[in-house]
Amino acid sequence: MRDGFGRTIDYLRVSVTDRCNFRCHYCMPEQQRFLPRRELLDYSEIALIAERFMDHGVRRIRLTGGEPLVRRDIGVLIAHLGKYVTSGRLEELTLTTNGSLLADHAQMLAKANVHRINVSLDSLDSDRFASISRGGRLKEVLAGISAAKAVGIAIRINMVALRDINQMDLLPVAQYCAENDFDLALIETMPLGEGVSGRQNDYIALDEFVSPLREIAKFIPLAHRTSGPARYWQVEPLGLRLGMITPLSQNFCDNCNRLRLTTDGKIFMCLGSNLNVDLRQAIREGGVGEVDRLLETALRLKPERHDFENQLNDSTSRLSRHMNATGG
């Protein structure tokens, strides 16, 4: 699949739920309303849509949320999609998680051909972690990460950069990742969602955020790439592979290769845009042919780039949709 700007689209992010057992303050308000369950795609509908995407050239699928592991019987969907890794229709099935439920699901993920996951971890200080996540327990997350590592799942730690909140945590998290042979990805906070305060105060460009690490280590550019937008460096002598995701300070939209399926069946062509097509209605009323037609429409409507830079500084232009509603 190619969009209107000639970019190859081979990556689909699937939000299986907008619900989460954390309330990370950069993601959603503390008091958050979630979609009624009747509005969610069921697993057979998600699978059918995923299969249509595969037939159109998608080779990588990432399951997200909210927190994907809170959805009941999620292993049913993961096992179904994992079969396509075995058959070769998919190159990769991955997952983004907050890690709190990983200890109970690591074996299931490994058996279902989920060979790599991203785990959000914004601090190794238990009090600061609880504050950022509004109640998350660091001990549970670390236990989940250990369980996933024990069954052979490769792990990348995702850390959102927050000015004056977790800058002091970069070096401990980097050391933890290096010691455990985990990749580390740093992510600039993005201006998404009503009721999420402190956007301008919390934002820090990654070049500034990593300055303490640059003072003690050398950054060597790497050609390594995953499905997403991270640009990677080898950090020595730490022995760390570091990814940086810079939607505001260093725009990467020229190489965008992805679409997002929300838990209620909408395809969003860009995280920073409200443009979408409704596949839930198509699949329930129009069948496979209508789904295929809307996929073509989505490709035509995909914008050239997001507008996060302006949205950060102008609150009136920000999208009301929270990150958990679209999928991380």
Image (tube, rainbow, N blue to C red):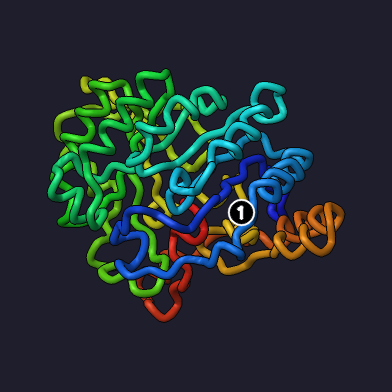
Q: What's the residue at 60%, 47% (across, down)?
A: 258
Q: Residue furthest right?
A: 289
Residue 305 quadrant: bottom right
Seen from the viewer's position, the closer of residues 95 and 257 is 95
Q: What's the residue at 34%, 74% (across, down)?
A: 195
Residue 304 appearing in the image: no
Q: Is residue 195 left or right of residue 122?
A: right
Q: Residue tagged by mark 1?
A: 261
* Type of the residue with mark 1: Leu
Residue 295 appearing in the image: yes
Give the image location of residue 62, x and y in percent: 55, 40
Q: Is residue 260 above or below residue 309?
A: above
Q: Is residue 261 left or right of residue 323?
A: right
The N terminus lies in which quarter of the figure?
A: top right
Q: Is residue 316 above or below residue 33?
A: below
Seen from the viewer's position, the closer of residues 5 and 111 is 111
| Helix, strand or loop for disc 1 | strand
Q: What's the residue at 60%, 39% (across, down)?
A: 77
Q: Residue furthest front?
A: 73
Report the number of discs: 1
Q: Is residue 151 left or right of residue 236?
A: right
Give the image location of residue 202, x and y in percent: 24, 61
Give the image location of residue 88, x and y in percent: 70, 24
Q: What's the residue at 74%, 65% (across, down)?
A: 281
Q: Is residue 31 above or below residue 144?
A: below
Q: Residues within 10 Å of mark 1 (few under 14, many from 20)?
A: many
Q: Is residue 196 left or right of residue 298?
A: left
Give the image location of residue 184, x and y in percent: 33, 34
Seen from the viewer's position, the closer of residues 105 and 177 is 105
Residue 57 quadrant: top right
